[in-house]
Each structure stands twice: as C-alpha cells, then as structure tokens.
Amino acid sequence: MELRGCWLLILQVFPGCAGIPFCDPEYLSAVGCPEVEHGIDWQVFLEGTCEKCPPNEPCQLDFEDTAFQLAQVATAGGAEGAPHFRCAPGLLSTMIIIAQYFLVKEPTPEVAKILGTGASLAPFPFYTSQYSRYANMVPMNLLLCNTQQSSAPSMYNRYVPRVHAEDSGFCGLVYTDDQLVRRCRSLRQNANVLARVGSTLDSLERIQCPAFEELKVEEGLGRKIQKYQDRANQLQCQDSRGMWHEAMSDIHKCVLITVGHWLRFRPGELVLDWGSGCGHKLSWAKMLFDVEGVGVEIQEPAVRWAQSHSAGMFCHGDGRNLSWLPELTFDHVISYASIYHLEKHDQCSVGIQLVRKLKIGGRAFLGWNHGPVMSNWEWLRCFEDSHEFVKEHDIAADGVEVDFDAVEDGYLFPPNANVLEVDLVLGCDGIRSAVRGALQAAGARVEQTRFQDRRPIVYRVLAIPTGKEDSTELNYSVRKDNVIVEALPNVEGDLLGVVLFRPTDERIEGLKSGAEAKKVFEELFPEWPTPMITDEEWDNFAARKTRQLPRFAYAGPELNLGGKCCLLGDAIHSVKPFFGLGLNSGFEDISVLDQCLGECDAELSKALPLYTRRRAPEAKCLVRCQRRFDQATDLAFALAFVLPIVLDSIFRKLLPSVFAPGLLALFQDGELSFTTAERRKRRDRILQAMIICGVLSLLGAGAFLSLRTVARLLWRCLSPPVHGWLHHELM
C-alpha cells in the first residue's frame, strides 16, 4: 500500500510533541490540529486511538472502528493529489495505524529520517519510531511454533525483520517459515519436551543480568564498536540492516536457520547468543525452533530495543567476562560476526568461557572468523591448551575438552543453486517470457499486446537428408496447394524441413501412418523432397505434434527495470517467420543495446532506459507493419501485400529519386530504423494517392469533355431534320 497523501506535509520540520500528555483533547489545538480537517474529526480519532492503542504498543483496532476508518481516509489521498493537512501528529498517527495493518511502501529518505527520531506524537498515543517497526517488521505471534504462546505477554510487541532467506539466492537451505514451523510443531509432540522446558525455565531463573552504572572498554575496542552503537541509536534494529551498514537480515536469517539445523535445535532447549545485537537471531530461533534464548550484548541501545521487541532474555555487559552466567547451563551457544572484534587473547578466553557454559554434549557455533584475526589452528591450540590458559589468567577452575571442527562458510552456507546474483539480467526467453512476467511483478510498465491470428498456420518438422551434389549453404523451398516446405541447413550438414499448412488441412493433420504421409507428399512434391525421406522419418513425421506459429505481439512501453534487467528478441516483438525479420530484429536489439552501453560508459542505470526509448517504438512498429500482411482472405492479402508491391514497383521505376523501395526492402535496410521506414513509406503512400487521384481526375475531366463534345456534334447534326418535322406537324 502506498501512503499517497502524507509525504509532502511530513517533509515540513516536525519538532515532536515533547511535554504534551497523551490522550488529552485540550492539546489538539496546541499541536496545530483543527477540529475537523478534510473530513477527519481529530477529536473522534484521538478518542478512538486512546481507547485501543496503548502508547508505543500495537493497536487493537477492528476494521469497523471509527479510528481505523478515519486513518484510511486520511492516508488514501485522491485522484487530484493529496490534501494538505495541518495536523502533522494526527496524520503521522494515521500512517502508523495503516503500517501496522497493511504492507506499505518505504517513504523517501528525508521522511524516513524524521520518522526515525522516536518523537512523541502526543496527544495521540504514538511515537514516530512505531512507523518503521510496523512497516519493516513482522509480529512474531503471526507464525509461532508454540501456538500456546501466541497470546502470551512474552510474545506481545515482539518482531522479526520482514525477509525471506529462501528467496535471497544466498541460502542453501530454502525452507519456508511455514515448513520450519510445521517441522517444529511435529517435534513438540515428543515426550521429553516437557522435561526440557522445565529444565530451561529453572536455568533462566538462575540467570541474573549484571548491573552497570557505566560500562567502559579500552579505547581501541571502543573505536571498533562505536559504529554499532550509532546504528542502534538510529533505530536500525527496526529495519533489515540491523547493526550492519546495509540490508543483510536475509543473510543473518539464513545463518540462524542453517546453524539451527546443524546444531539440532529442539523445542524447549536453551541457547546463548554472544553479541546478540538487536536480538533478531534469538527471535527467529524462538519463532521457528521454539528454543529459549539469552543474549549478551555490549551496546546498551541494542539491548534496550531487544528487551522491548525481541524474544528472549537480553543482558547488557562486557562479554569478555561471563562469570555471572552459570556453567553447564546451555544446550547451544552461537556467536556470529562478533568475537572477531577482540584481540586473540580475549577471543581464546571468551571461547573457553562459552564452552564451559554448555551442558555436557552441548554444541557451539562461532562464526565469521577471519584467518588473520584468529586462524583455525590458533582456535584449536586455544582449546587444547585451555587447562594451562585458564590457570594462567584465572578465568575458570579448569580447561575444556572439545570436539573441534573448522568449517568453511562455503560448505556451511552454500548458495541456492536455483538463484543467481548478477549485475544484469537479459530477458531473451521468447514470446512467453518469464523474465517479462518478473518485470511486471517488480513494477515495470511492460505489457504484452497480442493480436488475434487472422490467418492461422501450423507446422510440423521433417528431417531431410542431402544428396552428394546438394549445397548445404542454401535454403530450399517448395510449395503447392497451400502446403509449403521450407528447408534450412543445420550444422550436421542435413536440412531441417518445416512443413507449413492450414490447421484445417486434413491431408496432413489427419495422418495416421508414415505410409499415408509418404503418399500425400508423392502427390504434392514428387521430385523433392519426397524421394529423399526414409520410411522411418515418414513414421516420425506422422506421429509428431502439430505446432502453431507464434502470434504477432509486442511489449512496452518499458523494456527495462532500472539498471538491473532488460528484454530483447521475441520477448518484445514476435512476428511470423516469413520475411526473416524476427531473428534479424533480435540481432538488431543486441546491436542497439551495445550502442547504448557504449554511449553511457557501461552505466546500466542510464544505458537500459536509453535502450527502452530506442527499441520500444521499433518493436511496436515492426509487429504492426508485419501484421498488415497477415490477412484472413486472399483478396485482403492481395490488397494489403500484393497491391503495395505493384504500386511501389511502378512508381519506383517512374520516379526513382522520389519513391523508395517497398516496405520490406526498407525494413531490411540496415541504415533505417523500422519507424523511419514506416514514415518514409507513409509519405510515399500519400504521394501515390495524390498522383493516382490526380491522374484519375484528369482522365475523368478528359472523358467528360470528350462526351460533351460528342453530344454537341450529335445535336448539331440532328437539329435541322428535327425542326423541320416539328414545323410540318404544326402546319
């Protein structure tokens, strides 16, 4: 859904409504809200939202509620543009409600910056930060493995990023959320789930997050992690970037799903996430695997957000000291792209501590490790020498015994072979182009216009051997009685025959055996190619399926999607293969695209729109002109195809400097575009019509003068006898 009526007003400076209480209608005028504005009664809207929308929490509105209906009216806009609202906090509040209930498009970066400030919209019970939370994320309780917890307070107001790892092309595991949840619900039927849940709840009661008045780290580490604090403060936890500089939530969801399968997450188990960030991974783990989670994170803004909107227990602390966590407690430990920020000594210390938090037989995953930072051999040596390490640095009573396995990312997270990530997609997949359909789904204005077939023609293929004296560099053709055989050479040296006929021709359509086929061809084409075909090929020909020639169709007005994809060939223009223009125009598409890339220095965002502007009109022109020659009757064909050829031939001989060759000849001229050729031929038709009309007018005038002269002569010759006779009668 697009909030068409909102962006212009929101771009005004909006300072927020600090100091104004929620739900007090007396403050409506203080924030610039009139009583009624463009049909919106702001006091009625305020009363409705205050009744069912707790501050900074989801609304519990029904579609029939007046507040919800007013929100729809305010955000709908109109055909003539959006109305100008003075009540900025009220309008923002309506946008937040719509974002909670519908999928909405992202606002402009300027508007997103304002919405990300976390400002109060009092007296309306909302904060600007709620918009991105609802627009970019999905409530966990919409699809939860443990259905008994869907309405539990621990799942209220909890969210995960709106991403689909299975469609990203990065993830080897392409299970959907529905599949993972069904699998999890099946595992919940096991008898020992209740025992695991009880053990996990007991463990959670024993965990107390450390308390810090102020958490300080050394300067070098502080510089490394400052960017994560900045991102958390900018509410990136509420979009697909999370704590990263770009959208990577689909990758992190893939990591969680893959690690969950690899470590064998089971319902009721307890997972520790070291460097939990915004808590997205533990939320996915709860939603899809029904495990409980504890997160440790050094960035207080991220912990604060996770405690409010992610599933699990989240503690703010320096993860280098985990003495506050009880040992032998967790079934699994995960850490991704976090530990590598530490010095090697601290990495080893944290690794040993994390292993000690595992139950006997528990499993840990420490991912995103870089060789220069901490190599696999250094990790192995760390665990092997852990007994001496812990005594030397006094971090634990004893070392650890581990079954260590170093796995490359390419093995653990193989890319989805069905999805490729590329810079450019060229859609050359024919008249039923799947790429064209994908462009339409992505919002490109590419529509295919298909024409009804006026003169249906079908075909079957026929393998034709060549004789010793036959040339394989020529096309062969023969026709008789509305049956045409076109034979094209192939790389093996034989000919590929295409037998064209009307779909109502029962001589070929009704063939039941190779003998019948051979007999029909002996009557039609006794000299060639009938004598060269083997009996086996006649049997194959009779059994082959009859196929129809493609219908005339063109695509447009857009042939590209930004700088990512464009269409060529039959995907944008489909014609019947009678004049060699289908394949050749496809080659011309390639040539034009190459020219556009050269003119734009290979900058796809400029070259592909330029290609559209040049080729979309040409595709339309080619198809419409070719279709004029495809007429339902012989008379119509003669008038549309034969007559223009005759006229062009006559006028070309009379005035070669004025009249161009026929339209097909112009189309085959590599120097002229299709639209230029059509304009030239349209001019010729006008001149021809004027000359023909002039000649006919002169001939008509000459005939009239001749007839009038003859009439006068006859009158003069007959006048005396007639007058004498009249005089005689009167006497």
Image: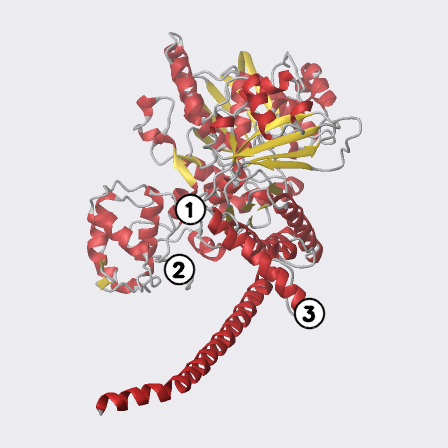
The answer to whether marks 3 and 1 mark residues whose Cβ atoms lie closer than 8 Å is: no
Name the spot of residue 137 as percent of width and height, x first.
42, 39
- Asked if labels 1 and 2 touch by Cβ distance under 8 angstroms, the answer is no
Residue appearing at x 66%, y 53% in the figure: 668
User: Whole-percent x and y of residue 253?
Assistant: 51, 30
Mark in front: 2 vs 3: 3
Please give the name of the residue rendered at 35% of the width and 62% of the height, measured from the top-left corner: 81
Task: Indicate the amino acid at tag 3.
Answer: Ser
Q: Earlier in the sequence, mark 3 or mark 1?
A: 1
Frontmost residue, 332 versus 48: 48
Q: Is residue 513 above or below residue 295?
A: above
Q: Amino acid at mark 2?
A: Ile
Q: Nearer the viewer, residue 197 or 728?
A: 728
Residue placed under numbered mark 2 in the picture: 10
Residue at image location 24% in from the left, 42% down from the top: 61
Give the position of the C terminus as an image quadrant.
Answer: bottom left
Measured in 3D between alpha carbons, the distance from the residue under mark 2 to the one under mark 1, in whole angstroms, is: 15 Å
Residue, x 62% and y 53% (percent of image)?
664
Q: Label 1 is placed on what type of residue?
A: Ser
As displayed, is residue 131 above or below residue 386?
below
**Label 2, label 3: how many angstroms apart (C-alpha)?**
64 Å
Please tell me in which quadrant of the rendered image residue 718 appears.
bottom left
Kindly identify which residue carries mark 1: 132
The residue that disc 3 covers is: 657
Mark 1 residue element: helix
The residue carrying pointer 3 sits among few (fewer than 14), some (14 to 19) or many (20 or more) residues within 10 Å by Cα, namely few
Mark 2 or mark 3: whose residue is earlier in sequence: 2
Examine the rendered structure and indicate whether residue 103 appears above or below residue 694. above
Task: Identify which residue, 687 or 396, lies in the foreground.
Answer: 687
Q: Is residue 226 visible?
A: no
